[in-house]
Image: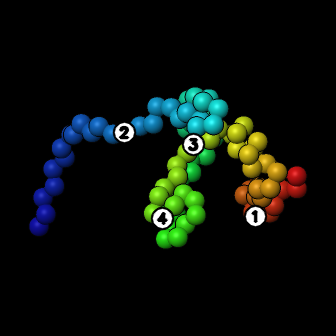
Amino acid sequence: MIKIKQIKRQVTEDVIESVTCDRCNEKIIGTKMTNNEYLKFSYEGGFYSEYPGDLNRIEFELCEQCMKELFGGFARVYDLLRGGTIIDK
């Protein structure tokens, strides 16, 4: 037989307070941050990788405006509420 008792514990956890765009330095806080209205990018180069080099990592965060400016001309945008169809530009 297993006997269980309840124990109250105080837990400390890391919570993101803000995100700063690495391109324009806009500070993303509040609902924009909690709604993930920013891009967190992380990429590791493999062997013989020209950029960023063998086993090096690139990381950055971008606000939505910078995402639009950098990727808006070629990125595919999918409407996830309509079955993942591509939205016409």
Q: Is residue 1 left or right of residue 48?
A: left
Give the residue displayed 48% in from the left and 55% down from the top.
57
Query: Which is nearer the N-term, disc 3 or disc 4?
Result: 4
Three-letter residue code for mark 2: Asp
Which residue is label 1 attached to?
83
Q: Is residue 80 left or right of residue 5?
A: right
Q: Nearer the viewer, residue 58 or 1?
A: 58
Q: Is residue 61 left or right of residue 2?
A: right
Q: Which mark is residue 18?
A: none
Q: Nearer the viewer, residue 75 or 88?
A: 75
Helix, strand or loop for disc 1? loop
Marks 3 and 2 sit apart, C-alpha to C-alpha, by 18 Å
Task: Evaluate whether residue 21 shows in this view.
Answer: yes
In the rendered view, tell whether residue 65 sits above or below residue 26. Answer: below
Image x and y of residue 22, in percent: 58, 37
Marks 1 and 4 sit apart, C-alpha to C-alpha, by 38 Å
In the rendered view, tell whether residue 48 sits above or below residue 17. Answer: below
Three-letter residue code for mark 3: Glu
Q: Is the C-beta separation of discs 1 and 4 under 8 Å?
A: no
Which residue is label 2 attached to?
14
Which residue is label 4 attached to?
54
Marks 3 and 1 sit apart, C-alpha to C-alpha, by 28 Å
Marks 2 and 4 sit apart, C-alpha to C-alpha, by 31 Å
Three-letter residue code for mark 1: Gly
Q: Is the C-beta separation of discs 2 and 4 under 8 Å?
A: no
The crowd level at tag 4 (other Cα within 10 Å; few <14, some 14-19, many 20+) is: few
Residue 31 falls in which quadrant of the image? top right
